[in-house]
Every structure is written in C-alpha cells, then in structure tokens.
Image (cartoon, helix red, strand yellow):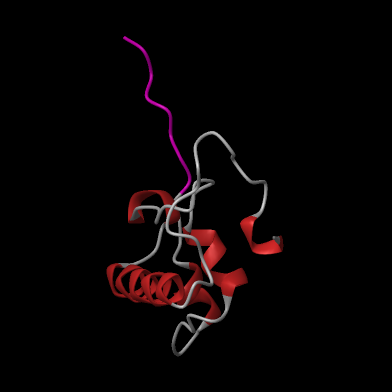
C-alpha cells in the first residue's frame, strides 16, 4: 500500500504575528489568503484558525466593495497582478 504524504502543520499567521484586527485596506496582508484568481482560500490551505479566517473573509469582502480587490479575474485575460493596473 502506498504511504501517505505527511505535510507540515500549518500555523495561523495572524495568531503568530499577534495582530489585533485585520484592516481591509492592507492589501499585502490579504494577498496571502487569496488564490491566483483572487478567490478566498479555505482554512485547510492557509492554516488560519476559525476566528481569523472569518475576519479575513470579512476584510476581503469589504475590500472588494471598495474596489481594492477585483471580484473576478477574466479567464481569457489573466492579469499577472491586478493591483498594479
């Protein structure tokens, strides 16, 4: 039988950094929780705790409403970095 791969434990970056709150205007911090198509990544991939994942989701949604982060990326015209347009 094939052996299962063992992955290293992922730690919540926000708990380790001892951050009080997540600001929706801080795009660099939010980029770590977004995929290349700017979808919100799940907890199992980012390693965030439930508390911080919920706060990240709220911050990303607020940033999208303020047009700081795009809602979708066009599949035909994938932009390398939409923040530098």
| Magenta span of residues | 1-8
Please tell me whether residue 6 belongs to the stretch shown in magenta.
Answer: yes
Quarter-wise, where is residue 4 in the image? top left
Which quadrant would the C terminus be assigned to in this image? bottom right
Q: Residue at x 48, y 74 (%)?
A: 14
Q: Residue furthest top?
A: 1
Q: Residue at x 49, y 72 (%)?
A: 67
Depth check, front residue: 28 or 53: 28
Q: Residue at x 50, y 48 (%)?
A: 73
- Residue 7 pos. (x, y %): 45, 39
Which quadrant would the N terminus be assigned to in this image? top left
- Residue 53 pos. (x, y %): 34, 68
Depth check, front residue: 3 or 64: 64
Relative to 31, say whether 15 is above or below: below
Q: Residue at x 45, y 62 (%)?
A: 11
Q: Is residue 68 left or right of residue 45?
A: right
Q: Count the marks: how many?
A: 0
- Residue 29 pos. (x, y %): 57, 71
Q: Main secondary structure of the magenta part?
A: loop
Depth check, front residue: 16 or 25: 25
Please tell me whether residue 59 belongs to the stretch shown in magenta.
Answer: no
């Amino acid at each position: 039988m094939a052996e299962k791969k063992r992955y290293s434990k992922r730690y919540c970056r926000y708990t380790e950094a001892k951050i009080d709150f997540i600001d929706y205007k801080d795009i660099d911090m939010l980029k770590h929780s977004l995929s290349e198509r700017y979808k919100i990544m799940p907890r199992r991939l980012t390693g965030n705790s439930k508390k911080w994942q919920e706060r990240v989701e709220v911050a990303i949604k607020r940033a999208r409403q303020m047009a700081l982060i795009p809602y979708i990326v066009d599949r035909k015209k994938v932009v390398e970095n939409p923040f530098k347009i």
